[in-house]
Image: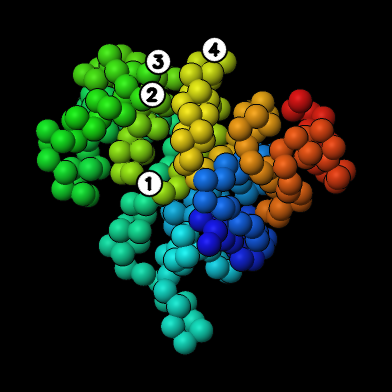
Amino acid sequence: MPMVKAEQVCKNFGSNRVLRGISLEVQPREVMCIIGPSGSGKSTFLRCINHLDKVSAGRLYVDGELVGYREHGGKLHELRESEVAKRRRDIGMVFQRFNLFPHRTAAENIMEAPMTVRRTSRADARAQAAELLEGVGLGDKLDHYPAELSGGQQQRVAIARALAMKPKLMLFDEPTSALDPELVGDVLGVMRQLAEDGMTMVVVTHEMGFAREVGDSLVFMDGGVVVETGKPRDVITEPRHQRTQTFLSKVL
């Protein structure tokens, strides 16, 4: 069973058609990288996967379950927000901006969701936070506040925070785009390790080296549609479509 299955997914914002029938599958343990120009619908599609944005048409499944809806009698019925939140626990998401609570330490940022949602005890949540921070190379930053951390360090805390809920799927929305170039490598290193550990990941990125080396599949989107998909090295070195060729000629 695919971890993610999209069937003709469309998303409109008023008269603006952002997604125009996206169909793709992400298998368990697969790392899918999505590339494309700004405004192509990449981030919107990612947000639809965990129902931060509601699809306008089509169907979207995560681990065999409809995202945000249940089907009855051939019709879709939207789930209550509490049901959506319950299913969303299995999906971790890391944004361009780190969105850390500025008044809480690195550990406290990570502890919040397990304590609130899973009713984990404070002692167990802190032990888990320490382990996760160690795993992203920040074992000595447990009691540091976001303002005391670099952008790359904050993003690694954000990754640890998403992992604290033990997700089955991780979504990354251009996680390095807000970082200074010298800080990108540390974040990509954490993501590489997640891939090696078997985490299923969908990554919207402009980091072509990461897509080529770590990705199992590469999707090029433009104008709200999937223009081309395939093995990263094939798409990057021998793109079949002219639009893909033009885009890659500008970013490589």
Type of amino acid under label 1 = Pro
Packing grade of label 4 (10 A; few <14, some 14-19, many >=20) is few
Residue picked out by circle 1: 167
Residue picked out by circle 2: 136
Give the secondary structure at mark 2: loop
In the image, taking residue 20 as reference, residue 234 lies left or right, namely right
Type of amino acid under label 2 = Val
Q: CA distance from mark 2 to mark 1?
A: 16 Å
Packing grade of label 2 (10 A; few <14, some 14-19, many >=20) is many
* Disc number placed over residue 150 in the picture, else none: 3
Type of amino acid under label 3 = Ser
Eye-nearest disc, 2 or 4 = 2
Within the image, what quadrant is residue 146 found in? Answer: top left
Which of 214/56 is in front? Answer: 214
Q: CA distance from mark 3 to mark 1?
A: 26 Å
Residue picked out by circle 4: 182
